[in-house]
Image (spheres, rainbow, N blue to C red):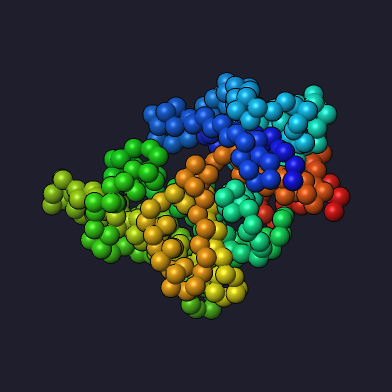
Amino acid sequence: MATILAIETSCDETSVAIVKNCNVLSNFVASQMAEHGQYGGVVPEVASRCHLETVNEAIAAALEEAELSWSEIDAIAATCAPGLVGALLVGLTAAKTLALLHNKPFIGVHHLEGHIYASYLTNPDLKPPFLCLLVSGGHTSVIQVHECGQYTTLGRTRDDAAGEAFDKVARLLGLGYPGGPIIDQLAKTGNPQAFSLPEGRISLPKGGYHPYDCSFSGLKTAVMRLVNQLKASDPNLPIADLAASFQETVAKALTKRAVKAALDYNLSTIAIGGGVAANRGLRQLLKSAGEEHNLEVLFPPMKYCTDNAAMIACAAAAHWEVGDHSPLTLGVQSRMDLSKLQTLYTATR
């Protein structure tokens, strides 16, 4: 496989990585958590400025760590969709400039496909078809992986993504931003059965419920009402129990849908991707469910759960192998369904 230098700037991490044969030679990540924490969430203009200030340093650091020269790089890749438009433009422009400067092919990568390929970084022998449960701050999807570039979205959230729900509930509990790691830590000492919270099922027009879609806005509202009720009798909230109960509800909803989809479509492997893949409660429930139903469950290492360029490079390498390159006229898109993925590439297969 090719040696790929990739740039990821879709949201609030500036990352540059070099990957060869699913082997990570370098993976530089500069987080903007401190910059956005004071606002309680990601501010697009701040994110773009931070990427501009950091991207050149990140490129240099990745090359230095990998101990490679430009002549040893086969192609340049960058995330082009979905994400914050200004942030995406920084990484895409840098990648296209490098491709022109060093006469290298350019490969645009869909951010969600990068999360699918995160599992390949530690499981290079993983073969489709398999199921991917993609859970992050902006996306929650159940995806059937057929082959490189060929995906079917079986289910998705109808409102808040799982990561968004963690952030909003953390704000309700006065825990700060980002919410996922804080709630996960508090849940260790809480009782997950302390409070009964709604799962958030999606009704079908002719009755019943969608088997793979989910909803978290109602769960967030239920937590808000519960907090208000508890405060009315005692201002000292049982924060750990609330965190544990909320986390357990989210993890159960995600696990139930992923396992059902895998069994319904006769898929023996579930690969997890996205920042919420680092959640301890979700990992425990999915591993237990996998053992119960004889399913292989793959979690990326913690450092590859959140946004990183190594997963983008791995996805780009797969497209390189099948002959996909992107034109230098390629733009960025804030939203893009995985079904439109092949529009990123010239028809070289």
Inspect this view and state whether residue 162 appears: yes
82 w.r.t. 124: above or below: above
Residue depicted at x 63% and y 59%: 126
Q: Nearer the viewer, residue 94 or 5?
A: 5
Tell whether 329 sits left or right of 239.
Answer: right
Give whichever of 220, 251 is nearer the camera.
251
Which quadrant of the figure contains the C terminus? Answer: bottom right
* Horizontal arrangement in the rendering, residue 166 relative to residue 107 (left or right): left
Q: Is residue 139 among the parts visible in the rendering?
A: no
The x and y percentages for residue 240 are: 24, 50
| Place of residue 56 in the rendered image (x, y in percent of width and height, measured from the top left) | 63, 22
Q: Is residue 44 above or below residue 270?
A: above
Marks counted in the figure total 0
Quadrant for residue 15, please give it.
Answer: top right
Residue at 33% across, 43% down:
182
Q: Is residue 228 left or right of residue 309?
A: left
- Position of 327 relative to 158 (above/below): above
Nearest to the observer: residue 175 or residue 71: 71
Percent x, y of residue 208 = 48, 77
Residue at point 54%, 32% (across, down) = 29
Taking the spot 65% from the left edge, 46% from the top edge, the residue there is 22
Of all residues, the one furthest to the front in this rendering is 67
Q: Residue furthest right?
A: 348
Identify the image quadrant of residue 141: bottom right
**Residue 162 horizontal/vertical position (percent):** 45, 53
